Image (cartoon, helix red, strand yellow):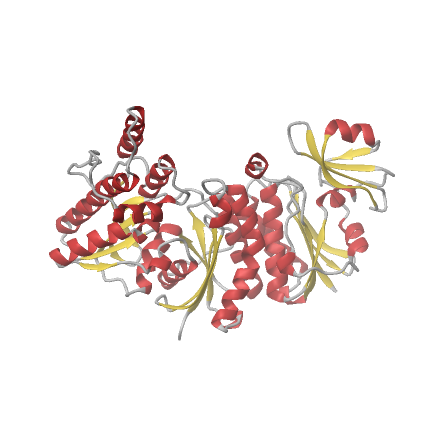
Amino acid sequence: MDIYALAIESSCDETSVSIIKNGIEEIATIISTQIDIHKEYGGVVPEIASRKHVENITIVIEECLNKAKMTMDSITYIAVTYGPGLIGSLLIGVEAAKTLAFVYKKPIVPVHHIVGHIYANNLVKRLSFPLVALVVSGGHTELVYMEDDYKFKYIGGTLDDAVGECYDKVGRVLNIEYPAGPKLDKMASLGKDTYDLPTPLDDDSYNFSFSGLKSAVINLKHNEEQRGKEINSEDLATSFQNRVVNILVKKTMKALKEYNINNLIVAGGVSANKGLRNKLIEECSKENINLTLPEIRLCTDNAAMIGAASYYAYKLGKVSTLDFEAKANDSF
Amino acid sequence: MISFFIDTSTNIGHVALLEDSILIKHIKIVSNNNLSTNIFKYIETLFKESNIEVEQVKKIFVAVGPGSFTGVRIGVTIAKTFAWAKNIEIIPLSSLEIMASSSNENAIIANIDARRGFSFAGVYNKNLENIMPDTYISLEELKNKYIGQYISDTENIDIEKIVKKHKFDEPVNPHKINPIYLKKTEAEENHA
């Protein structure tokens, strides 16, 4: 029998609802983004985000069902992001999901946000195991080994800033409007690698560190300005992005080789970065690695990935009672 | 007709089921440090011990604030999702008026500490008629303008009284039920 998940994601500034069939087929997804509101403040304001989620939540659920031309009767269970994320934002999705589960007497499956990002790839192609997942977002930079569905082993990760966070901070220095990632990526594609920036944590470990690179960019800009020289923003973007992408790809390829794995997936908001995508495609084709990248539209936060991830949790019996907690911080 | 009442806007939460305006069961949530985690345990118990099915509920009364921002949002999210899902009527209630229901004084100053010498306050009489609309006001101004009984908790609220008063209110589209904060976010205030 076909299994339909109605999934809700509200961990940051997107209110999203999706209906996913059997973990692999997207029936309908609605993403209501607040990006234009938060742009005014140079970043996500948690209290504003929470307020918007309450206003949007039932509208987005209804739109999704309408788009799918389905009613709640044909939904098998409810899935929801329980964390990590902004606690006030998470709570809206969690309470709405619990309410749906309660009034319709349906099972509920809490899903970890990053596990969701990993399973965005499952909507492109069913995951092949074992695999390595490179998780890159505003809050995460991790290499994860997966032997099977929901079997995660941490290989390495950032010791300080997440890669997306580093992009936002560098963006601020270069006066680029929030969110800086996509704009920096575009600038990087137009510039030349002319600035002398350090390669961050180029060692034998699987860990990353981006705060040194971030400081180097800030200092470089400051020093050039002191000397009355103008910064070429595009060249600086290229130089910065090359350092980031090179080390991410280098350590990822090393992990694949060492663990003798030929499946690689990429997850999280920064997986939309063209520089990163191109470099990975190039290296993976050289090394004969089976690479899966999420659809650009599903790189950022969305409920489709939560629906996809929830299916395997549901199959594994990870159904919850209604007293699970929304968690701002949680490892997986 | 069965109604569901929910108020999670202050440090004491309330969920109740009523038949017409008579309480069937009322659960007071005193230790609500982890309200968002536990709220459905109380709601499930409420329905179970009242022997009421979700399908029997025809109307929802919800406290929409002012109050704890997060607290209000929890109750409002549950209430609007419930009402939307079951296509039933929903009636928003002032959290301050709910507070005032616990008194029979002629002037009741329901107030919630909003810090920095301010409070969210509303003045009601014993029939819950509104004398001063709910507002964000300095304590000093409040004290100068109104004399009455100050109430700032929901320990002894009279749910039947408030439901009786509002049972014929025009229901609101669940999508349009939103918290009333009475205060912009700090970011918005600083930005203006």
x and y percent of residue A262 in the render? 16, 57
x and y percent of residue A89 in the render? 50, 47
Q: Residue at x 13, y 50 (%)?
A: A257
Instruction: Decide: is A275 above or below A163.
Output: below
Judged left or right of residue A138, residue A153 is left
Q: Residue at x 21, y 43 (%)?
A: A192
Instruction: Decide: is B76 above or below B141.
Output: below
Taking depth in this image into account, of A151 and A144 the one nearest to the observer is A144
**Quarter location, residue A105:** bottom right
Viewport quadrant of the C terminus of chain B: top right
x and y percent of residue B162 in the render? 78, 50
Tag count: 0
Taking depth in this image into account, of A279 and A26 the one nearest to the observer is A279
**Quarter location, residue A282:** bottom left
Judged left or right of residue B176, residue A274 is left
The reply to whether residue B20 is in sight is: yes
- Residue located farthest toward the bottom when viewing the structure as drawn: A1
Viewport quadrant of the N terminus of chain B: bottom right
Judged left or right of residue A311, residue B112 is right
x and y percent of residue A284 in the render? 16, 56
- Residue located farthest toward the top when viewing the structure as drawn: A226
Taking depth in this image into account, of A287 and A274 the one nearest to the observer is A274
Q: Residue at x 54, y 47 (%)?
A: A50
The reply to whether residue A332 is in sight is: no
Judged left or right of residue B179, residue A232 is left
